[in-house]
Image (spheres, rainbow, N blue to C red):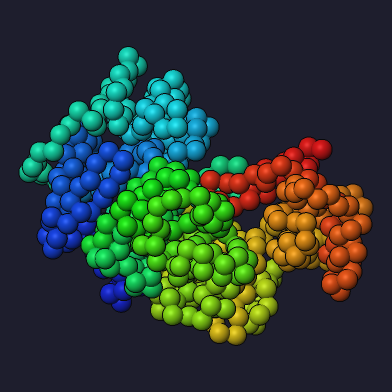
Amino acid sequence: MNLRAHFDGYKSANILKNETLIENLYKQVEIRPNKTAVIDKNQKLTYKELFEKVKTFAKVFQNIPLSKKDRVMIQLPNSIEFIAVLFACNLLELEPVLMLPTHRHSEITTIAQILKPKVYVGTTNYLGFNFCEMVEENLDSLDFIDCIVADKDFKSTEVSYLNLDDYKFENYDLNAPKSFGGSIGAYILTGGTTSMPKIIPKINEAYVYNIKKAIERCHFNEGTIYLAVLSIAHDYPLANPGVLGTLFSGGTVIFAETTSFDEAFHWINKERVNTTSVVPAVIEMWAENYDWFPGDLTSLKHVLIGAAQIDIEKLSKIEKQFGVTIQQGYGLGEGITCFTQLNDPPEIRLGTQGKPISEHDEIKIIDSNRKLLNPLEIGEIAEKGPYTFKGYFANQNLNSKVFTKDGYFLTGDLGYIDLTGNLVIAGRVDDQINRLGENILPKEVEAILKEYKYIKNCAVLGVDDEELGQKTCACIEKTDHLFTIQDLRDFFEDKGVARFKVPDEIYFVDKLPYSNIGKIDKKKLSEIFNKD
């Protein structure tokens, strides 16, 4: 199927409109210029002041000089500078490349070699690390970078440099090009089950549509006070609905530099935050430390949870503990976004990932032969819709494999549609264990293990084995109580679970490794097991 023609069909049907990110910010500047828009540890800006900062940074880029469609690599912590640089790029129709604070030389060089950015925008100090120096030290492999733009206090003898901190607000009258909806709003990177992230082009008009539909489903409005704790280089906290959804709704965004409970609780108490987006590992950490904080957290009313699965009983306890309503979701930088409804009954709101946010989104569950499966049958999630991307940048080989002939994107995620039409995630296709021809879902085994009285947290994965094909290994966080694999075999037998689902081996660790989006890093665990 011609994906571009399919995408153009949404435009001709007036589903996608010719609009950009910066246009939607400016609408709010005109409506509420003096309302507080953004807050971080250094400053608080109104919508009018934020737009002035955007224009100031745009003038900086014009003076470098940069022109339409030049690329700008951004690697900043959550801050007003990050969002202002992003909008400045959009104003000038530059193409921003969003890098995570966890990325280092390997990822920076790989992505930069593909996209060839002319400018790198970074910080000189985030958690003790100087990102601008890192890039300066590797300019031999990044010779297309003409200028390093630092947030402050940076000088270079190797390349042209600028410090954003040197530029104060000025009411610049910019000769900026009129952006159009078909231009690139940003390049974002996949969270990555592969060794290197893949590059996702986000088209302005499709991204705006995605954000507005997420706003509708999550009921963001001018009263939303949103705390951004996850890195906004990720699609989820940036735009689903996230920071951009809050600003497009006329709300207020507070930028936290980390996900730590003490920083988050400080902001909730100080700024009366009512909404945030987290991953399960973060909300569980907050819950463990809830009683420690002496301040007032009662303003928090709405918590979005995505990126990984979490037990429904845990979510129910967290709702009661914090006095909040939790909305579960599922989404991909490549496309589809699902959320439960705020008025769904708890068993749906907490036990499923909801339905697509757009009536034009399409989901189907297919088997390994791409045959359509019935409700409650687990298979791969395939999807298409108005904001599903057209393919990874400069990766035609992969693109030829991840789209079906009728234009559905193969997500690589396992799931099923329940009898109410809601999506339930069951893991990754690659995670499925094939043990002597029997297919085992790690999520199912993990759920059973967590019912055992001495297991709080665990991860199950398949490890290559000459006799079994794959053996099932359970990696379990240590507690004060010791037990053996025979204890687990007895436990599984008492529960009436098929014998082939019992782990073949167990390993005890002090702490499971997590990825930068809060998922247990099974790739790292697999490397450890296969090395052993």
Q: Look at the picture and state if 124 lies above or below 261.
A: above
Judge left or right: residue 276 versus residue 493: left
Judge left or right: residue 428 versus residue 474: left
Where, by quadrant of the figure, is residue 123 drawn?
Answer: top left
Judge left or right: residue 496 versus residue 80: right
Who's the residue at 44% across and 58% down the image? 277
Q: Position of residue 473 (x, y in %)?
A: 80, 52
- Residue extending farthest front: 294
Q: Position of residue 122 (x, y in %)?
A: 36, 33
Q: Is residue 469 visible?
A: no
Where, by quadrant of the figure, is residue 341 drawn?
Answer: bottom left
Q: Position of residue 365 (x, y in %)?
A: 61, 74
Who's the residue at 27% across and 57% down the image? 252
User: What is the total number of numbered labels drawn onto the structure image?
Assistant: 0
Q: Look at the picture and state if 476 lies above or below 276.
A: above
Who's the residue at 68% across and 78% down the image? 377
Q: Position of residue 488 (x, y in %)?
A: 86, 59
- Of the pair 34 and 160, the residue shown nearer to us: 34
- Residue extending farthest top: 157
Q: Quadrant of the C terminus?
A: top right
